Image (cartoon, rainbow, N blue to C red):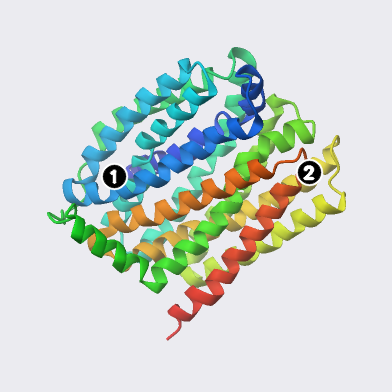
Amino acid sequence: MTPSRRIAVLLTLLVAFGPVCTDLYLASLPDMARDLATTTPMVQMTLSAFVGGFAVMQLVYGPLSDRFGRRPLILGGIVIYVAASLYCVVAPSIEALIVGRFFQAVGACCGPVLGRAVVRDLFAREQAAKVMSYMASAMALAPLVAPTIGGWFHTAFGWRSNFVLLALFGVALLVLVWRMLAETNAHKDSQALDLGRMAENYRQLLTHRLFLGYVLTMTAAFGGLFSFISASSFVLIDVMGMAPHNFGLAFAFASGGYLIGGFAGAKLTHRFGIERMVLAGTIGCTLAGFVLAALVWSGLARPGGLEGIAMIMGSVMAFFASCALVLPNATAGAIAPFPRMAGGASSAMGFIQMGGGASAGWLVGALYDGSARPLAAMMAMMGLVSLLVYLRVVRPATRP
C-alpha cells in the first residue's frame, strides 16, 4: 500500500468517529430508556447531545489547528474521547450519560473536522472531492457493521458494553495516529486565534455565496439522514416489531446505499463535476423522501410485517445513496476557495451541518407519536430543502 493510500485509510478512520459513535449503540436505545427509567425523547438526547457537542467543537478545532497544526489537536482529542467513553460505561443516570456523550463528542470531533482539513492540505479541489468520495464510501462500512456488532454485544453483555468497544476503538486509533500521521499544515497562521481575525474569517465564510450555499445544501441532506439515525431504532424495533439483534441488518441495508452512492460519486465526479453530482444527489434525496412519506402516510408500509419494513428501508437506502453524492462533493466545493483557512472553513461548515442535524433529530424525537410518520415527513422536507437551496443559491453562483 502506498503512503498516500495509508494516509487515506487513516483519515477514513478519523472521519468515521462520528458514525461509529452514533451507530454502534442505536439498537440499545429502547432498552436504555427502560433500564434508566426515562423517556424516549431523553434517550434520543444522548444522540442530540453528541451531535451538539460536535457542532460546538467544530468552531474550536479548526482555528486551533490553523495555528498549532493538525497532529497535536487530533492526538489530544482522541485522549478526551477515550476518557469520556469510559465515563459513559459507568454513568448512573440518563443525565450523566448525556453529559458523557457531550464530552465524547468534544474529543471525537477532532477526527472529521481535522481529517477534512488534512485532505485539503494534501490534495487539489477535484482530487480532494475524489478522495472524500472514497472516504465516504469506506465510512459507510462503519454503519454497515457497527449496529450489527452493537446489537450482538447488547444482547450478550448489555448496552454498556458498547461504550467499552468505543473506548477500545479510540485507543487503537490513538496508536495509529501517533505512528502514521505527520504534520500536514505547512501554512500555520499566527493570527488564527486573534478574535478580530477569527471574526473576519467567519464573516468572509458566511458572506461567501458559494460556501454558504454548499453548506446549507449539505446541512439539509444531512438533517434527513440524521433524522433516520435518531429515530430508526424506535421506528424499526418498537413500531415495526423488529428484534434488536436484527436491527443492524436493516441499518446495514441503508448504509449499503451510502456505500453505493459514495463509490459512484468517486467514479463520476471527475467526469461530471461537483455541481452536477450535488444536483443529482439533492434530486434523489427529494424523491426518496417523498416516496417514503407516501408509503407511510398512506398506510402501505404497515407495522408487523417484513413487507412494511422493506418498503421503508428501500426508500431510506435511496435517500442514503443520494446523500453520498451530496455530502463529499458539497464539502469539497465549500472548502476549495479557502486554502489558507481550510481548518476554519471546515469548522464553520461542520458547526452548521451538525447543528442542523441535531435540530432535525431533536424535532423528530419531540414529534414522535409511536408511528413512522414524523420521520417520513422530516426526511421528505429535508430533501426538498436541499434541492431548493442548491437551485436558488449554489447553481446561480457557479454559472458564468
Name which residue lies at 49% across and 57% down. 327
Q: How many marks?
A: 2
Query: Is residue 140 placed above or below 352 in the rendered structure?
Result: above
Within the image, what quadrant is residue 340 found in?
Answer: bottom left
- How crowded pointer 1 is (Cα within 10 Å; few <14, some 14-19, many 20+) is rated as few
Query: Is residue 147 placed above or below 261 in the rendered structure?
Result: above
- How crowded pointer 2 is (Cα within 10 Å; few <14, some 14-19, many 20+) is rated as some
Percent coordinates x, y for residue 98 in the rendering: 49, 29
Q: What element carries label 1?
A: helix
Name which residue lies at 47% across and 49% down. 354
Question: Are discs 2 and 1 less than 8 Å apart at CB?
Answer: no
- Residue ranking furthest to the left: 190
Percent coordinates x, y for residue 8 in the rendering: 36, 46
Which residue position is annotated with label 1? 3
- Residue ranking furthest to the top: 157
Dot 2 amino acid type:
Ala
Q: Distance between the residues labelled 2 and 1?
A: 42 Å
Quarter of the picture holding the N terminus? top left
Name which residue lies at 65% across and 38% down. 251
Which residue position is annotated with label 2? 310
**Mark closest to the chain's N terminus, 2 or 1:** 1
Q: Please state which of residues 184 and 91 is positioned toward the viewer in this rendering.
A: 91
Percent coordinates x, y for residue 186 in the rendering: 16, 54
Q: Is residue 203 visible?
A: yes
In the picture provided, is 360 more to the left or to the right than 370?
left
- Residue ranking furthest to the bottom: 400
Dot 1 amino acid type:
Pro
* Numbered circle sitting on residue 70: none
